[in-house]
Image (cartoon, rainbow, N blue to C red):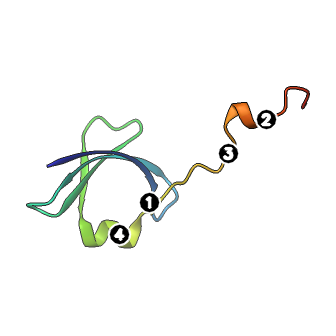
Amino acid sequence: MAEVDRRFRDHRGIPVHVVRWEPQTRRVIYLREGYDHECFNPLEQFQRKFTELKDDHEPVDAIPADSD
């Protein structure tokens, strides 16, 4: 089992937080906001239905101090 900390969006556009990968069972374990239990999908299904979220914002220190 491998601990993971990555964010994805499902095929409906809902974000999820991937917390674990189980190579023995080939399952991806993730959390949904507002849901108390872990969710999982087989790797092949997860790869088809989820898209990884990338940071698309600038770091705060890259913004000029005089910008509004």
Q: Please state which amino acid type lies under the numbered disc 3.
A: His
**Classed neighbour count for the residue bearing mark 4: other residues with Cα under 10 Å, few (<14), some (14–19), many (≥20):** few
Q: Please state which amino acid type lies under the numbered disc 1.
A: Asp
Query: Which callout, 1 or 3, points at the residue further toward the start of the chain?
Result: 1
Identify residue for label 2: 63
Query: Which callout, 1 or 4, points at the residue further toward the start of the chain?
Result: 1
Residue 65 position within the rendered picture, expressed as x and y whole percent measured from the top left: 85, 26
**Is 6 above or below relative to 62?**
below
Q: Please state which amino acid type lies under the numbered disc 4.
A: Gln
Residue 33 position within the rendered picture, expressed as x and y whole percent measured from the top left: 42, 39
Residue 14 position within the rendered picture, expressed as x and y whole percent measured from the top left: 49, 53
Marks counted in the figure total: 4
**Classed neighbour count for the residue bearing mark 3: other residues with Cα under 10 Å, few (<14), some (14–19), many (≥20):** few
**Which quadrant holds residue 24?**
bottom left
Q: Secondary structure at mark 4?
A: helix
Query: Which callout, 4 or 3, points at the residue further toward the start of the chain?
Result: 4
Q: Please state which amino acid type lies under the numbered disc 2.
A: Ile
Q: Are marks 1 and 3 in contact (CB under 8 Å)?
A: no
As drawn, the label of residue 57 is 3
Q: Is residue 65 left or right of residue 37?
A: right
Q: Are marks 1 and 4 in contact (CB under 8 Å)?
A: no
Q: Are marks 2 and 4 in contact (CB under 8 Å)?
A: no
Question: Viewer-nearest of labels 2 and 1?
Answer: 2
Disc 2 from disc 4: Cα separation: 35 Å
Identify residue for label 1: 10
**Is 20 above or below relative to 66?**
below
